[in-house]
Image (cartoon, grey):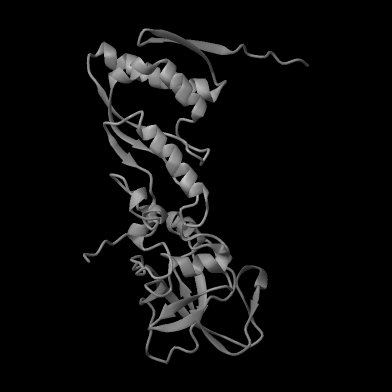
Amino acid sequence: MSKNKSKPKWKKINAAGATFSYQQGGDPDNERIAKAMAAGLKARKKEEKLPCGLHFDTGMRRNGFDSQDLKKLFENISILDSFELKLMMSHLVSSHASENPINEQQKHLFDDLRTRFPETQYSLSDTGGIYLGTPYHYDLVRSGKGFFGLYAPPPGEAPLLPCARVLGRILQIRQAHKGESVGYGATHTLTRTSKLAVLGIGFADGYDRRLSNNAHVMIQGLQCPIVGRISMDYTVVDMTDVPEGLCHIGEWAELVNETLTLDTLAHRMGTISRELSTGLGQRLSRVYLPQ
């Protein structure tokens, strides 16, 4: 049975004294410029200037106008008359590796673009870019994860203070015997009679399953290893070495703190701390404390 192929949808933009046609859902380069022109036309009809920022792709191959877009933009440069340019920006690919030559290559491209847009503010650096030195700072830096201490500065620089803590309440404390298994799939077998704490936090909250049998929590300042698989709502830890009477049902275990950091856990999982921090779910209550 043959399927009817839908015909390409073409749109035409008339703006800034130019006519520009593009295929909707077709060439994304054309579509990006066409959308900018459409916004400019809308502003012109309202007789106002829209505040805007220009994002140029200098190497990430992700967001922003690339070299082909730039060519089309300058072919229709009067479209910018409809905008009030507030910021020109790009994004570094490898700022965490200061020796990578792509940093200097991107900066060179960015500086060349700055000569085309001389009367605005500029931003290139993320957290890593801050440590590349003043020439990379321009008017604004975007420290992002650095605000949360989720970055290891180069040697010789002061360390950032991690500011995130993640707590899980102890819902049950139970005894289990040597040779018994814990959790789904029986992935952990106890080697001694043990005191287990069941925490009310699991992978549905963003506490990643890859930490199963691969990390610990802190209870009253003592390390308590995760035993068995982390499940959707619960995590089981071995608190045998916590002295009797020092911890009770209803108290808190620290899953992340100033020493047991997201970076530490990410290293165990073979990932980055941002994956963990952005995965912490909405079921977790947030408390923001003054410095």
In this rendering, the answer to whether 56 lies above or below 151 is above
Residue occupying image coordinates x 28% and y 62%? 287
Is residue 94 shown left or right of residue 15?
right
In this rendering, the answer to whether 280 lies above or below 33 is below
Residue occupying image coordinates x 36% and y 28%? 116
Residue 138 x/y as whole percent? 31, 45
Quadrant for residue 260, please give it. Answer: bottom left
Residue 93 visible in image: no
Pick whichever, 218 or 69, lies toward us. 69
Is residue 93 shown left or right of residue 270?
left
Residue 241 x/y as whole percent? 48, 89
In this rendering, the answer to whether 107 lies above or below 13 is below
Residue 196 x/y as whole percent? 51, 81
Residue occupying image coordinates x 36% and y 69%? 159
Pick whichever, 111 or 273, lies toward us. 111
In this rendering, the answer to whether 140 lies above or below 41 is below
Pick whichever, 181 or 206, lies toward us. 206
Residue 171 x/y as whole percent? 42, 73
Pick whichever, 242 or 65, lies toward us. 65
Quadrant for residue 73, please give it. Answer: top left
Residue 52 visible in image: yes
Is residue 20 shown left or right of residue 39?
right
Is the C terminus in the top left, top right, bottom left or bottom right quadrant?
bottom left
Extreme right residue here?
1
